[in-house]
Image: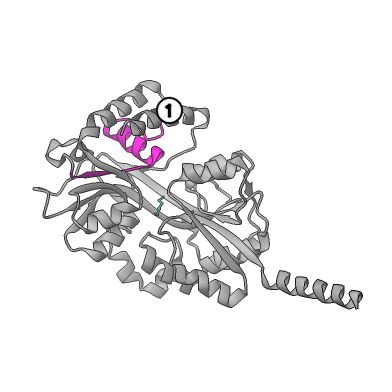
Amino acid sequence: MKRILTIALFLSLLVSAAAAETISVYNWGDYIDVDTLSQFTAETGIDVIYEVYETNEDMYAKIANGGSSYDVIFPSDYMVERMAGEHLLHPINWENIPNAANIDERFMHESYDPEPTYSVPYTWGTMGILYNTTMVDEAPDSWQTLLDPEYAMDMLMLNSPRDTLGIALVMAGHSLNSTDPKDLEDAKQLLIEQKPLVLAYVVDEVKDKMIGGEAAVALVWSGDATFCMDESDELDYVVPKEGSNIFFDTMCIPANAKNVSGAEKFIDFMCRADIAAKNYEYVGYAIPNRAAIEVLGEEEYNASPVNNPPQEVLDKCEVFHYLGDDTKLYDQIWTEIISEF
Ligand code: N2P
């Protein structure tokens, strides 16, 4: 009898183990159509534990601490560079991601991961100013707008160290990859000068606030501008003439992932044309997936100057690079700026 019970227990454990294949996915907030998660589970039987973060730095801290294990993460360009260098990423086995063939070759050899070895392109975009046309006199075309007292308490900034310091560097006439302490001091002074004008430093909340008409201008990522402009006719987006950041966000597998094959299945699923198209319609960020753009209709997709900026705009944009130990200087300055807010 005891033996039968033991066998029964063993079998039931086996069944529940088989039924419970899971992957754990760690993504930016508002960065996926959650319907695609349930569709993935329905098609593969793999459950998805889904958690979100707001910035590359938050995600990095969690992974680098080693305490948590995820199977799929979504770092941007410079963070891929950093994490690859610190052996925090698992190489991608491209044979297991056949839908990666849908990704435009032009996105497959960016300098942050030129092979690519560790990252599968997911989305891309620029940073710019989202503004409410009923609250500004003239359409802004310069980052100086974010220093204009006319918008005191009508201005939202990004609570994201690299992004906001990067733009402050550009405002001060420097490269957004500068590590020169003098340049960074200029950027810091600009952000300190700007502080009394800033209503709030936000990340995902920027969308509700801008759609709700709570502020006149905001520093945003282009995909969030697309999302907001779909909801409100009063909003428009500009990449200022001084230049900006162009970013590439990716899907990666952390080195300590527990379910690499599940992660590969998920990444492959996200690269499928119908899924990437559906996801684009919800998320709003530009995609590198050619087959999905065909599904969406190339003409309609390309009609958006926000997600499909003209070459002269792109020519003025710089990608963030990982800055090694100088990142500490950025962190220090950021803490000073944000802590007294
Ligand atoms: C979406 C975050 C987008 C990340 N909430 C921009 N790199």
Say whether residue 229 is visible: yes
Residue 193 in the image: state x and y as whole percent.
23, 29
Q: Nearer the viewer, residue 48 or 132?
A: 48
The N terminus appears in which quarter of the rendering? bottom right
The C terminus appears in which quarter of the rendering? top left
Residue 223 in the image: state x and y as whole percent.
34, 57
Three-letter code, disc 1: Gln
175 drawn magenta: yes
Residue 246 in the image: state x and y as whole percent.
38, 47
66 drawn magenta: no
Stretch in magenta:
154-177
Q: Quadrant of residue 34?
A: bottom left
Residue found 41% across the figure and 54% down from its top: 124
- Residue 309 placement, left or right of 214: right
Say whether residue 309 is visible: no
Q: Mark 1, residues whose alpha carbon is within 10 Å: few (<14), some, or many (≥20)? A: few
Residue labelled with disc 1: 332
